[in-house]
């Protein structure tokens, strides 16, 4: 409607938007896998105990960074 201003988008709403989540998951799949290969590749190749907690954290970091960047872009552009 004319004359009415749009409600600003909150960071949480922007971070939970489908497009942001999908983009962050794609980035996570690529960057997380590369980081796991770099940081834990020796365990996979040479054997040893796999620390699943560290691997999960390794994937969480690029997801958090990609989500933060996309959500902040959405908030600041609205």
Image (cartoon, rainbow, N blue to C red):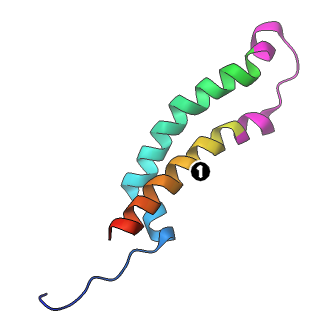
Which residue lies under the disc numbered 1?
Answer: 64
Whole-percent x, y for residue 26 in the image: 46, 38
What residue is shown at x 37% (from left), y 53% (from top)? 19
Residue, far left: 2
Predominant secondary structure in magenta? helix
Residue, far front: 76
Whole-percent x, y for residue 10 in the image: 46, 74
Q: Is residue 4 above or below residue 52?
A: below
What residue is shown at x 73% (from left), y 33% (from top)? 55
Placement of the N terminus among the 4 image quadrants: bottom left
Mark 1: secondary structure: helix
Range of residues picked out in magenta: 42-57
Q: Is residue 53 left or right of residue 8?
A: right
User: Which class describes the residues within 10 Å of circle 1: few (<14), some (14-19), or many (20+)?
Assistant: some
Q: For residue 73, which quarter of the picture?
A: bottom left
50 or 64, nearer to the observer = 64
Placement of the C terminus among the 4 image quadrants: bottom left
What residue is shown at x 57% (from left), y 46% (from top)? 63
What residue is shown at x 82% (from left), y 25% (from top)? 50
> Magenta stretch containing residue 46, yes or no?
yes
Query: Is residue 16 in sight in this rendering?
Result: no
């Amino acid at each position: 409607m004319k004359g009415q201003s749009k409600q600003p988008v909150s960071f949480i709403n922007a971070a939970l938007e489908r497009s942001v989540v999908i983009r962050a998951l794609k980035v996570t799949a690529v960057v997380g896998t590369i980081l796991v290969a770099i940081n834990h590749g020796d365990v996979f190749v040479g054997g040893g105990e796999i620390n699943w907690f560290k691997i999960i954290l390794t994937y969480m970091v690029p997801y958090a960074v990609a989500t933060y960047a996309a959500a902040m872009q959405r908030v600041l552009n609205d």
